[in-house]
Image: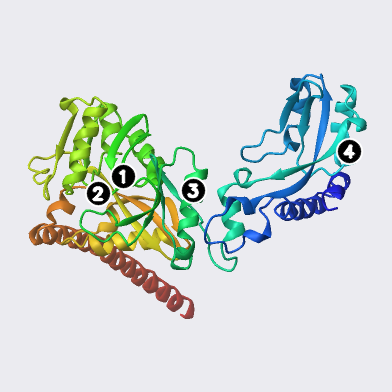
Amino acid sequence: MLYYPLLRLHQYSNQLSLVLVKNLKKYTTMELKPPESVYLMTTLNRNVFDKPSTVPLLHIGNTKVSSILPIIKKLLLKMENFKPITHDDDKGTSIYLNPEIIKNWTDLPEDVRQSLEELNVQVTNFKLEEITLKYENFSSESIFKAVLPKDKEGVSSFTKVGHIVHVNLREHLLDYKNLIGEVLLDKVKGCKSVVNKLNMIDNTYRYFQMEVLKGTDNMLTTLKENNCKFEFDFSTVYWNSRLCTEHERIVKALNPGDILFDVFAGVGPFSIPAAKKNCIVYANDLNPESYKWLIHNKKLNKVSDDCFKGFNLDDAFIGLFEADINPITLYVYCFAKGENPEEIARNLIKENFKIKNVDIDSKITDIFRVRTVSSMKEMMRVTLKLDRDILVGVPDDKKRKSETLNEDVQLKKSCIDKNGQEQEEKQQCVQSSRSQEFKNEIQS
């Protein structure tokens, strides 16, 4: 048994111990997984997941669980909808252990056995019992690994938007979409709808077409993020729960009294918490549905009109630089596909911010990886100093003045260098003349 030498050899060889731990992990995935008969199932049959298993347990009688649990907590049998600690009026308390780690009493680490024996729990308290693992005991992840094709990518992830679970299924998984939807509806807490994205986000308002795999077709959802409550129709607006941490980062970077211009505000994941932090917020979104829910969420979170102004315009922030003000910090988000996402993001900004006589690269102050979207694809945040040069460009006469100034500086430097060279040549000439005079004197 692979787990047995782990208990013995870790004292003598860390390297060997690491190898055994890795093998043990591989071994454990074979023990408590669903039965092989569910492979390539397209219609969910929960009864097929029944699997007899022999598991170890400790009968501890009337010994206090609170004294036993700290000793064996890491060895408990942990599965969904399964209680590892049970109590019977006649038999007392029983504790189920993980059969992937423990097969018999001697598999318990020596220090664990000693601690148990001090509490009068001995080898005679150790038993093996036959139980039946069922569909409700397996996680969605283990079910998908057991059912879906092994040579292709499975259901790697999903997002939860209130009561809605959203997946993006590859073409080879479409035959299993009903099963996938039903499993997620069963397994994800609070889920009432499972939807699959049908196309890329390519429309003006940045939401996608979807199909309901299982559950209700009600797309009006409610969720909490960054101490704010949001309500919206998921089928008509853009929302990405994976950006919760990024929303929090930006809001934390703001100070009360700061002014925030949210150009693509959506339903308010940046704007609403910023306004609640007493920032002055100007939020705009072109999508009428997003704007409707933006204003709704403003009222829902009791945001004052004094610090929040919403817009549904294509040019909401024209005229920012009618007067001289300090440069604005600008956050730009983009996707970088390739081995050097920072450099790719930098080049994307330079290609798309082609402004007359302005070096955009000099305006970039930070490039940050927001999250990994997929293999070789990163979502990036580029921070720029947004000043008058970027907004209105640099006139040719200003550029000429700058170039003239640079030329003057170079000319003065050249003159200094030239004068220095002339002085050096004159000095060399004097020294050469004196040297020749000295030689002539010697020869005479």
Judging by the rendered image, the residue that carries numbered circle 3 is 184
Amino acid type at circle 2 is Thr
**How far is disc 2 from disc 4 in space, using C-alphas?**
59 Å
Judging by the rendered image, the residue that carries numbered circle 4 is 105
Amino acid type at circle 3 is Leu
Q: Residue at x 16, y 46 (%)?
A: 288
Mark 2–mark 4 CB contact (< 8 Å)? no
**In this view of the protein, can residue 114 be seen by the observer?**
yes
Amino acid type at circle 4 is Trp
Q: Is mark 2 on a helix, strand or loop?
A: loop
406 or 378, nearer to the observer: 378
Residue 70, above or below 49: above
Using the image, tell me which numbered label, if any, was put on residue 17. none
**How far is disc 2 from disc 1 in space, using C-alphas?**
9 Å
Judging by the rendered image, the residue that carries numbered circle 2 is 236
Residue extending furthest toward the bottom? 443
The crowd level at tag 2 (other Cα within 10 Å; few <14, some 14-19, many 20+) is some
Mark 3–mark 2 CB contact (< 8 Å)? no
| In this rendering, position of residue 25 left or right of residue 186 | right
